[in-house]
């Protein structure tokens, strides 16, 4: 059996109200709760379920980011990952660089699956999985809502614009996960204690043989969304229709 690689990204917790810095240079992160990207939690849960069915040798959680991302990797270890690896990088990482990192790790570990969240909730790029599949020259199944392994095949149900699509792909392959694939497990205190003893290695882009990231995309400014105006109460449908006509909607 082969291992499964799972991507873990450190992001601002989904429950936090994001605030933009006064100068528009970024978002406020000081004192803000950081968590595992929700789509990556789903990816990890799926990998753990596959291993629990006896279809994988181990689950390796991988993060690319600052030293603080070790906190999210420890969360992944507490969920059940066997070991973790941090590719320590200070500064933003664009999808192509992330894909090149996962390519190097896939070549090293020879996994049957690389499972990634379909996107991160901070930048919403949704590109790393597709780029990795192209660089690795392996099949991909994106936006997976169901995954069944059958020998050297994976049967994947995908969420597409017109409904659901089921495809079969050869392994090894790249899978990106959608929200309805599963519900991540609750982490118990004994699991948190056990995670402290699990191996967590740290490496760099240079040690992996990946070129330093180039800034292909430059963020010019961050802006908060406009404040919504107050709603208007109407007495009945006729008054609603009149108000919409007044605004030129009807």
Image: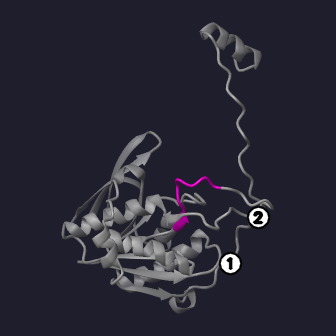
Residue located at (34% from left, 54% from top): 183
Q: Main secondary structure of the magenta part?
A: loop
Determine the secondary structure under disc 2.
loop
Q: Residue furthest right?
A: 23
User: In the image, what residue occupies the spot 28% across and 72% down?
Assistant: 190
- Say which quarter of the image contains residue 65: bottom right
| Towards the viewer: 135 or 94 | 94
Q: Which residue is mark 1?
A: 214
Tag 2–tag 1 contact (CB < 8 Å): no
Q: Report helix, strand or loop for mark 1.
A: loop
Q: Eyeballing the image, is 214 above or below 241? A: below
- Residue at which label 2 appears: 25
Q: Is residue 28 left or right of residue 32?
A: right
Q: Residue furthest left?
A: 54
Give percent across and percent down for residue 166: 33, 50
**Image height of 87 relative to 155, above or below:** below
> The C terminus appears in which quarter of the rendering?
top right
Sort mark 2 into few (<14), some (14-19) or many (20+) by Cα contacts within 10 Å: few
Task: Identify whether 156 is placed above or below 87.
Answer: above
In the image, is residue 33 part of the stretch drawn in magenta? no
- Nearer mark to the viewer, of 2 and 1: 2
Task: Say which residue appears at 36% left-offset and 74% top-offset.
Answer: 77
How far from the left and from the top, in percent, is residue 70?
48, 78
Question: Is any part of residue 26 visible from this angle?
Answer: yes
Query: 218 or 106: which is nearer to us?
Result: 218
Q: How many marks?
A: 2
Magenta segment range? 10-18
- Residue 137 spot, x, y in % from top left: 44, 73
């Amino acid at each position: 059996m082969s291992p499964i690689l799972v991507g873990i990204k450190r992001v601002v917790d989904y429950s936090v109200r994001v605030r933009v810095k006064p100068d528009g240079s970024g978002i406020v992160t000081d004192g803000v709760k950081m968590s595992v990207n929700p789509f990556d939690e789903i990816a990890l849960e799926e990998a753990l379920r596959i291993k629990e069915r006896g279809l994988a040798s181990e689950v390796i959680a991988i993060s690319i980011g600052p030293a603080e991302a070790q906190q999210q990797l420890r969360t992944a270890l507490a969920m059940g990952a066997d070991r973790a690896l941090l590719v320590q990088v200070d500064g933003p990482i664009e999808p192509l660089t992330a894909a090149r990192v996962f390519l190097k790790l896939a070549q090293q570990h020879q996994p049957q699956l690389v499972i990634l969240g379909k996107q991160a909730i901070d930048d919403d790029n949704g590109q790393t999985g597709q780029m990795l599949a192209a660089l690795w020259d392996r099949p991909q199944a994106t936006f997976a809502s169901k995954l069944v392994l059958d020998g050297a095949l994976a049967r994947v149900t995908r969420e597409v614009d017109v409904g659901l699509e089921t495809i079969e792909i050869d392994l090894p392959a790249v899978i990106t996960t959608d929200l309805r694939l599963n519900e991540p497990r609750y982490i118990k205190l004994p699991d948190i204690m056990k995670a402290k003893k699990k191996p967590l290695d740290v490496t760099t882009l240079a040690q992996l043989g990946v070129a330093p990231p180039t800034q292909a995309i430059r963020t010019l400014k961050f802006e908060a969304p406009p404040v919504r105006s107050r709603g208007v109460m109407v007495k009945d449908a006729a008054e609603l229709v009149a108000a919409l006509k007044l605004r030129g909607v009807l």
